[in-house]
Image (cartoon, helix red, strand yellow):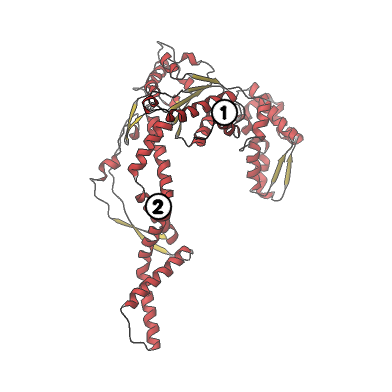
C-alpha cells in the first residue's frame, strides 16, 4: 500500500476491470490520500477527512468490483451493504449503524484468523502433547506388558527404577512419530469437552442482537456454571485438528486483536453503499418517501463522522471511506438531501458497456469469463477453445440484447455463455478427451432460435 502510486493502483485494477478509467483514477487518488494523511503532522492529521465518492452508472459496469478489488489490493476492511436495506428508525428494517458493527466484526474475524495462523505451529505442538497424553496410558501399559514378557523369556529378573521412565519416553516419541506419519489417523479416541449451558432467549425487535450491542454469551458466561464434561469419540486425525484449533484460539490475545481491528476499521475501513439511489425521496413527501429521506438523515452522522457504540467499544467513523453507487435511472444525485450530497464531494459517472468492452471482458482480465469456462471444463478433461469470430459474435449479441431489453451490463455475458455452453457443460463427464472449437457457426447454431424470436430472447437472455 505504501509503495503503490495512483498509476500503479489503476494498473492493478486494470488486470480485473475493463475500462472505467475515471472511476479508477478517483478511487486511486482517494486511496493514496489515506497514506498521505498518515504522513502529515499529528495535529493536522485528524483534520483531514476522506473524500467520499459516488459512482453513477447502470448495473453491471464494474462499480462494486472496483471497490472490492480496491480493498483486496490494500488489505483494507471492506463491507458492502445495500442502502435499501436500511429504513428510518420506527419502520421495519435495519439500523444504519449496523454496517459499522458488521465491518468491525468482519475485521476482528479476519485478524483473529491471521493470528491463529501465526501461532499454528506452536498450537500443533501443544495439541500433539495433549493427544499423546490421551494415547500414552494405554500404549504405556502395553509397552510395559510387552517388556515384562520379553524379560521373562530371557530369564531376566532385575528391573532398574529408571527403566519404566525410559520406556515411557521411548513410547511417547515412537507414538509422536507414528502420529506425524499419519499411522494413527484412523484410530479412535475420546475427547472431553465442556459445554456451558445457555438459556433460551427470544427477543422481538426490528434490530438484531449485534445492533443492540448486547452479547448475552459474554454477559452470562461468568455467571453460568460450566456444563458437565461431554465425551466425543473422534478419530485421531480429527482430534488433532480439534485440539490444535482450540490451542490456537487460546494462544491468541483477543483484546489485542480487538484493539487492532478497531484501529484498522477507523483508519483504513471502506464501506460500499450500493443502491444509494433507492433511498432518494422528495422533500416533504409522504408514504415511502418519508422513510427514504429518514434513511438519508440517519446516514448523515455516520458519513460525517461520529462514534458508533459496539460490544467491543466505540468506533469512530471520521476516517472511514464511504463509496456510494447507484444507477440513478429515475432520480439523480441532486435528489439526495443537500447535507448528504456535501459528504460525497467526488462524483464519477461510469460508462455503459458496448461490444468492444464485452470482447475485452471475455478475454483480457486475469479472471476473464472464457478462461473460467475453459478451466472448468478442463477438470473433465474436455478442451474448449474459442475463435475470434465467436468472441466477436457473443459480444455483439450481448450488446444487442442489452439495448433491446434491460441493460444489465457485463452480467449479460454470463447469461449468454451459460446458454451457449449448456449442452457441453451437461455432457462433459462423458466427453473426456474431446476437443471442442466454439466458432461463429457454433454460436449461431446454439443461439439461432433465441435470436430469431425477440420475445424468447428477452425471456431467456
Q: Residue at x 40, y 13 (%)?
A: 286
Mark 2 nearby-residue class (10 Å; few <14, some 14–19, many ≥20):
some
In terms of sequence position, does the residue under pointer 1 or pointer 2 come before the other? 1
Q: Residue at x 63, y 35 (%)?
A: 365
x and y percentages locating residue 422 in the rendered image: 66, 39
Q: In this view of the protein, can residue 200 be seen by the observer?
A: no
* Depth check, front residue: 449 or 444: 444
Helix, strand or loop under label 1? loop
Quarter where residue 362 is shown: top right
Distance from the alpha carbon under mark 1 to that under mark 2: 38 Å
* Depth check, front residue: 105 or 343: 343
Q: Quadrant of the C terminus?
A: top right
The residue to which callout 1 is attached is 62
x and y percentages locating residue 161 in the rendered image: 30, 78
For this orientation, the residue located farthest to the front is: 41
The residue to which callout 2 is attached is 245
Q: Residue at x 65, y 40 (%)?
A: 371
x and y percentages locating residue 363 in the rendered image: 67, 35
**Considering only vertical position in the picture, is 197 above or below 153?**
above
Q: Residue at x 49, y 64 (%)?
A: 181
Amino acid at each position: 500500500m505504501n509503495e503503490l502510486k495512483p498509476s500503479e493502483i489503476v494498473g492493478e485494477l486494470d488486470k480485473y476491470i475493463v475500462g472505467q478509467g475515471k472511476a479508477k483514477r478517483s478511487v486511486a487518488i482517494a486511496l493514496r490520500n489515506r497514506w498521505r494523511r498518515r504522513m502529515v503532522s499529528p495535529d493536522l492529521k485528524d483534520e483531514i477527512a476522506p473524500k467520499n465518492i459516488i459512482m453513477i452508472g447502470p448495473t453491471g459496469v464494474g462499480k462494486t468490483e472496483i471497490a472490492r478489488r480496491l480493498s483486496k489490493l490494500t488489505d483494507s476492511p471492506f463491507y458492502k451493504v445495500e442502502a435499501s436495506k436500511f429504513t428510518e428508525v420506527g419502520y421495519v428494517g435495519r439500523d444504519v449503524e449496523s454496517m459499522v458493527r458488521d465491518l468491525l466484526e468482519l475485521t476482528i474475524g479476519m485478524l483473529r484468523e491471521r493470528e491463529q495462523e501465526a501461532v499454528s505451529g506452536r498450537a500443533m505442538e501443544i495439541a500433539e502433547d495433549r493427544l499423546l497424553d490421551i494415547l500414552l496410558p494405554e500404549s504405556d501399559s502395553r509397552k510395559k506388558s510387552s517388556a515384562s514378557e520379553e524379560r521373562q523369556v530371557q530369564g531376566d529378573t532385575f528391573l532398574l527404577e529408571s527403566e519404566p521412565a525410559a520406556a515411557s519416553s521411548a513410547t511417547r516419541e515412537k507414538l509422536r512419530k507414528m502420529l506425524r506419519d499419519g499411522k494413527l489417523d484412523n484410530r479412535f479416541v475420546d475427547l472431553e469437552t465442556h459445554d456451558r449451558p445457555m438459556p433460551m432467549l427470544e427477543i422481538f425487535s426490528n434490530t438484531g442482537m449485534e445492533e443492540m450491542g448486547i452479547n448475552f454469551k459474554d454477559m452470562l458466561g461468568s455467571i453460568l456454571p460450566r456444563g458437565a464434561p461431554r465425551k466425543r469419540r473422534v478419530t485421531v486425525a480429527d482430534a488433532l485438528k480439534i485440539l490444535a484449533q482450540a490451542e490456537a484460539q487460546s494462544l491468541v490475545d483477543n483484546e489485542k486483536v480487538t484493539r487492532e481491528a478497531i484501529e484498522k476499521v477507523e483508519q483504513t475501513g471502506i464501506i460500499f453503499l450500493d443502491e444509494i439511489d433507492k433511498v432518494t425521496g422528495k422533500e416533504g413527501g409522504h408514504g415511502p418517501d418519508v422513510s427514504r429521506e429518514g434513511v438519508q438523515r440517519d446516514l448523515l452522522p455516520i458519513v460525517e463522522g461520529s462514534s458508533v457504540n459496539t460490544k467491543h467499544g466505540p468506533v469512530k467513523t471520521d476516517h472511514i471511506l464511504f463509496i456510494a453507487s447507484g444507477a440513478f435511472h429515475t432520480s439523480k444525485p441532486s435528489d439526495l438531501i443537500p447535507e448528504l450530497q456535501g459528504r460525497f464531494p467526488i462524483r464519477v459517472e461510469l460508462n455503459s458497456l458496448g461490444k468492444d468492452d464485452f470482447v475485452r471482458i471475455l478475454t483480457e482480465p486475469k479472471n476473464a469469463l472464457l478462461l473460467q469456462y475453459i478451466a472448468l471444463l478442463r477438470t473433465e478433461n474436455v478442451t474448449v477453445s474459442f475463435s475470434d469470430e465467436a468472441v466477436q459474435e457473443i459480444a455483439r449479441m450481448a450488446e444487442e440484447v442489452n439495448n433491446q431489453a434491460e441493460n444489465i451490463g457485463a452480467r449479460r455475458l454470463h447469461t449468454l455463455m451459460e446458454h451457449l455452453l449448456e449442452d457441453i457443460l451437461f455432457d462433459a463427464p462423458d466427453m473426456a478427451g474431446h476437443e471442442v472449437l466454439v466458432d461463429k457457426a457454433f454460436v449461431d447454431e446454439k443461439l439461432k432460435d433465441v435470436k430469431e424470436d425477440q420475445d424468447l430472447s428477452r425471456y431467456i437472455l
